[in-house]
Amino acid sequence: MVDVVIVGCGAVGSVVSLALSLGGLSVAVVARSRGGDKVYVEGLGETHVPVLVWSEAASISPRIVVYATKAYDLLGAVESSLRAGWGPSAVVSLQNGLGSLELLESRFPGRALGAVVTFGATRLGPCRARLAGRGEVLLGWRRDVVSDAREACGLLSEALRRGGISAHCVGDELEPWRWLKLAVNSAINPVTVLAWSRNRVVVEDPFARELAEALAAETGRVAEAKGIRLPRDPVEEALRVARLTGDNCSSMVQDIAMGRRTEIDYICKAVADEAWRRGLSAPHNWFAYRAVRLLEKWLAGKKSPCET
């Protein structure tokens, strides 16, 4: 029995697994390849944790499972964890965009928590990352959850704080924060791909800034149409995050530089689809979705601007 299993050990998974371990919880990582038994995060520290592959997953019994995969890999990770016989009291989605928390809610009724991550992190290798901007983690739920999941929300938040990451359990107030993060992602991620630049381009280049502001505002309008009142102005928040993480490369830029698929379908396309379902249009998000899908092919493997 372990307190928490982190599925996936990319940039965000590395930070969360390290902070939870430093915060006093017993932590294990399940990844596609072993790659050692140490998690290292520049700016936070390092620790030894068991790093397992899926063929070994049945040997552990996690109390809480935190899914830190890419959104498009989540379904496969959930199915693998079920085949391993895991029966956690709570599961957590760390993915960007829409769809991932909804998937966990359908597979783990009453046990699914969401997390809004606002710190910047750059992947340096398997279970190795660099913190770029001290943000926070907000944990909570979209639909009512059982008492064990509520307890897990508080337990994880406290452990993250002890481990050096600001964190709070916001309970059933998560959804406005999730949509605010979506507005930030819809603004920063595609614009940094189009400019092939670090996050600072959003505030330093007038054309990049204008597009980012339009994307954030449009996402905010779709949230309002859903009856969601954002806790902060989406445009101001996108610019604030871009300033705080100016030296970081967005996860979308990092993915393309590594030749991987992006999560644009779960961000800008998800916003455009939600707008369409409500009889609205989201032309900026629809453009950003198509542009990034085109550039995924042409920029795949190009040297990251964070390496220059």
Image (cartoon, rainbow, N blue to C red):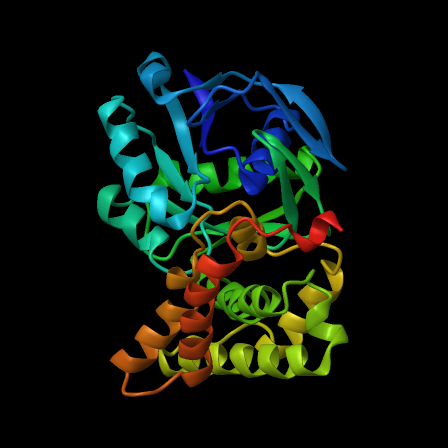
Viewer-side residue, 307 vs 119: 307
Q: Residue at x 36, y 52 (%)?
A: 101
Q: Residue at x 32, y 74 (%)?
A: 274
Measured as percent of width and height from the top left, residue 12 is found at: 56, 42
Residue placed furthest toward the top: 59
Above or below for 224 versus 241 = below
> Can the viewer see residue 198?
yes
Above or below for 6 versus 109 = above
Above or below for 254 versus 147 = below
Total labels: the figure holds 0
Q: Residue at x 42, y 51 (%)?
A: 261
Viewer-side residue, 217 vs 205: 205
Quadrant for residue 61, please give it.
top left
> Can the viewer see residue 233?
no
Q: Residue at x 45, y 37 (%)?
A: 152
Viewer-side residue, 47 vs 252: 252
Asked whether, in this view, residue 27 is left or right of residue 43, the answer is: left
Measured as percent of width and height from the top left, residue 75 is found at: 28, 43
Asked whether, in this view, residue 179 is left or right of residue 303, the answer is: left
Measured as percent of width and height from the top left, residue 255 is found at: 52, 49
Residue placed furthest toward the bottom: 280
Above or below for 261 versus 289 = above
| Viewport quadrant of the N terminus | top left
Measured as percent of width and height from the top left, residue 67 is found at: 42, 39
